[in-house]
């Protein structure tokens, strides 16, 4: 009797489907080509082939991890702040898989990145996915998120974007403050398939916040507006040479419009424009009075003014637009493409008078890169 042929799952070991060797080779060659001091690439390629054949995956060297994380930032088509990609500080914590330890190190990430107001770009890379062994995931979109509490009248106290995350945290045992407010910091939630999830509250010294004031409208300070200083995106998948790192929180620093023209202004976030328009005494009866535009300018002035007064790093959309074009020129001089998503690179206010508005951009998706969750795609910037 002829032997029974194996099923497809039996015929192809799980690990043979996990790492794309062509992608791994491309990355190793890229690393060596941009770092000639590493010498010939053949030996490292042979090591990677042997390791993948034996285990289904391979381990990046510390230098490869640092290079890959920085290039992932360089390749992020929706990020305008890539001029300083080489300055990214890479924290190599790949041996951590325990959800509680990961949450605790996220707290350290915030302290290091906040840096007393001199915000610095940092990425903390935790364990990668391995054959048959998924790595931990951070549930929060950013390490710092403000709660959103639905009201009986259909409104929301706080950040509308985080209503579901807030409900999840409460369901896991988080207790909101006795007096709920619009800027209650949510706890971090870290999950792993084979372990209990961890819920860790962020200590006050890890969350650097800036109270929002206006240089000419003193009443605005009485509203109690504030925003956190470190925009650390935490639910993206970092992909380097065929290996996925699903927990790799990273941050640059804020551009003022991310806060003033999006977080505070979007109708599915804090939706402050109508209220502020009335407080400013503007005619809000018609959009043709441009009351929204006037409020938006003053709100963004308040954000930039407040961060400057607090000594906390921030940039404006005009300066950052010019810096991005400088970045493109440097990349082109180095013989590299610089992908950019026009709809994200162009700022959400005064677009036509910024330097990035008046041109088209390369749209190729390059690797390494950041991707949403567990699906491929271009990295979004979550404000």
Image (cartoon, rainbow, N blue to C red):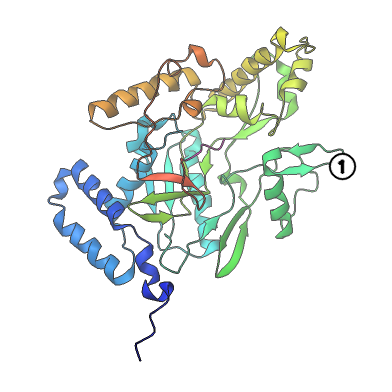
Residues 310 and 160: in front is 160
Q: Above or below — where is 199 with respect to 82? A: below
> Residue 48, how many percent across, how many down?
24, 61
Q: Which residues are magenta?
A: 379-383
Residue found at the far front of this picture = 1
Residues 20 and 99: in front is 20
Q: Above or below — where is 273 with respect to 67? A: above
> Residue 213, how many percent across, how many down?
66, 22
* Residue at image location 47% in from the left, 15% down from the top: 354
> Residue 167, how many percent across, how many down?
73, 52
Q: Is residue 287 magenta?
A: no
The image quadrant that residue 291 belongs to is: top right
Which residue in the structure is indicated by mark 1? 152
* Residue at image location 66% in from the left, 45% down from the top: 185
> Are there few (<14), some (14-19), or many (20+) residues within 10 Å of tag 1?
few
Q: Above or below — where is 357 with respect to 99? A: above
Is residue 159 visible to the viewer in this orientation of the structure? no
Q: Above or below — where is 88 with respect to 132? A: above
């Amino acid at each position: 009797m002829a032997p029974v042929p194996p099923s497809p799952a039996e015929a192809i070991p799980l690990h043979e489907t996990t790492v794309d060797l062509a992608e791994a080779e491309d990355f190793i060659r890229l690393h060596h080509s941009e770092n000639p001091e590493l010498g010939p690439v053949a030996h490292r390629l042979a090591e990677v082939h042997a390791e993948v054949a034996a285990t289904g995956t391979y381990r990046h060297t510390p230098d490869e991890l640092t290079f890959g994380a920085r290039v992932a930032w360089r390749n992020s088509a929706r990020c305008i702040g890539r001029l300083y990609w080489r300055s990214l500080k890479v924290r190599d914590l790949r041996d951590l898989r325990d959800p509680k330890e990961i949450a605790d190190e996220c707290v350290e990430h915030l302290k290091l990145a906040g840096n007393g107001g001199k915000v610095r770009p940092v990425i903390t890379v935790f364990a990668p996915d391995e054959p048959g062994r998924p790595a931990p995931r951070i549930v929060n979109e950013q390490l710092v998120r403000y709660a959103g509490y639905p009201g009986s009248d259909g409104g929301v106290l706080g950040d509308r974007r985080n209503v579901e995350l807030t409900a999840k945290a409460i369901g896991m045992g988080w207790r909101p403050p006795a007096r709920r407010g619009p800027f209650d910091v949510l706890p971090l939630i870290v999950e792993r398939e084979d372990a209990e999830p961890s819920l860790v509250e962020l200590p006050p010294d890890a969350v650097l916040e800036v109270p929002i004031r206006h240089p000419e409208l003193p009443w605005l300070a009485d509203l109690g507006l504030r925003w956190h200083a470190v925009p650390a995106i935490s639910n993206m998948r970092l992909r380097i040479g065929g290996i996925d790192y699903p927990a790799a929180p990273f941050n640059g620093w804020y551009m003022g419009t991310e806060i003033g023209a999006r977080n505070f202004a979007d109708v599915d976030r804090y939706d402050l424009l109508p209220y502020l328009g009335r407080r400013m005494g503007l005619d809000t009866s018609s959009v043709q009075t441009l009351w929204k535009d006037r409020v938006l300018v003053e709100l963004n002035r308040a954000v930039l003014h407040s961060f400057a007064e607090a000594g906390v790093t921030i940039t404006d959309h005009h300066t950052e637009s010019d810096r991005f074009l400088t970045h493109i020129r440097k990349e082109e001089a180095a013989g590299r493409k610089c992908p950019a998503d026009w709809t994200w690179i162009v700022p959400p206010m005064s677009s036509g008078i910024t330097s990035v508005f008046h041109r088209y951009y390369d749209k190729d998706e390059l690797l390494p890169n950041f991707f949403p969750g567990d699906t491929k795609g271009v990295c979004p910037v979550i404000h």
